[in-house]
Each structure stands twice: as structure tokens, then as C-alpha cells.
Image (cartoon, rainbow, N blue to C red):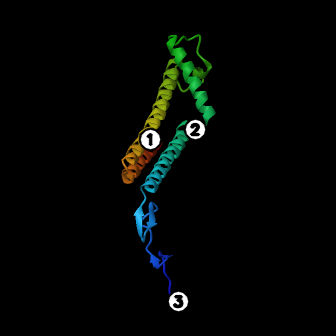
Amino acid sequence: MKVIQELHQYEDGLRPPSPSLAHTWEEGQWVLDEGNAAELLRQEAERLCANVDVAADSARRTLAGDPLRALEYQQAALQAQAFKDQGYPKKAVPLAVSAWVVKGRTARQAADQMLAKAAEFEANLLALREMRLKAKAQIRAHVAKGNAELAAQAADDGLEAIRALRLRA
């Protein structure tokens, strides 16, 4: 029994395998179809950008945790900022701030720590957004120049930066 793999029948014998999905069989030979190549490159860019978005969404969930808790912390930070803006009045400590007055912290220290945590959280989310947008812009720029390898490298670099931020936070 004879087994032939990777070859396809055509009119006068066996057709060699296509060099890529972008090639079409024309007049007895494989020819690069520029339209197919461009479409495949566009699809690859979309796939790479989607991978970056998925990684960023996952990192965002890790950084922010429960969305309602993140909203609660945001509201607490607003109360802490208002308390600070008023000069830390001892007779008007917001509930969100007084809840942090533990382990010997003063209301002022609690408010300042809350604001520092909120600033760190905000900085991490902004850094994540910048990493995501930068990676996607680089992917698209490389694809526009027809360079799939550099686009893939840009995606890998972006994913690595997102992972590093996620681990750091």
C-alpha cells in the first residue's frame, strides 16, 4: 500500500503543497495572492490585538478585584480627599476614613493612606491602559508595513509587560 501525504491530485499528477494559505494554484504553480496575504495579515493583527485585550482585561480584574468593591474604594477616596481639602477637621471625620482609624492611626494618617492607595491603584490602571494601547498600536504599525514577525514580537512584549504589572501589583 502506497501512502502519499501533503500532496493533492490535479489534472496531470500530484500537486505540491501550498507554500501558505495566501497562495493560489494558477496554471500549474502556486502563486502568492496579494489580496489573500493582506487579509491573512489583517486577521493575524486582529488576533494579536485580541490577545493583548484579553490579557489586559484579566490583569485589570486582578488589580481592581470586584467591580463594586473598586467603586466602594473610589467613593472612600473621594471622602478622604474632601476631608483632606477641609484641613482634616477632627469633628467631621467621614465614615470611610474613620473605618481606617485602627492600629494607632490618626484620621489624618488614615485619609492620607487611603489617598496613597487610591493613587497607586489609579497609576496601575493607567499603566495597564498605556501598555495595552502601545502594544496594539505597534502591532498595527508592523502589520501596515507587512511585517508579521515584528507584529508578533510587539504582542509578546506587550503581554510580558502586562504580566509583569499584574505580578507587581
Q: Horizontal and vertical percent for residue 151?
A: 40, 49
The residues bearing labels 1 and 2 have C-alpha atoms spaced at a distance of: 15 Å
Q: Which residue is mark 2?
A: 65
Q: Which residue is mark 1?
A: 165
- Which badge, 1 or 2, comes first in the chain's sequence? 2
Label 2 near label 3: C-beta < 8 Å? no
Secondary structure at badge 2 equals loop
- Which badge, 1 or 3, comes first in the chain's sequence? 3
Residue furthest to the front: 27
Seen at 49% across and 77% down, the residue is 11
Seen at 58% across and 28% down, the residue is 73
Secondary structure at badge 1 equals helix
Seen at 49% across and 29% down, the residue is 117
Q: Amino acid at mark 1?
A: Leu
Q: Which residue is mark 3?
A: 1
Q: Amino acid at mark 3?
A: Met
- Which badge, 3 or 2, comes first in the chain's sequence? 3
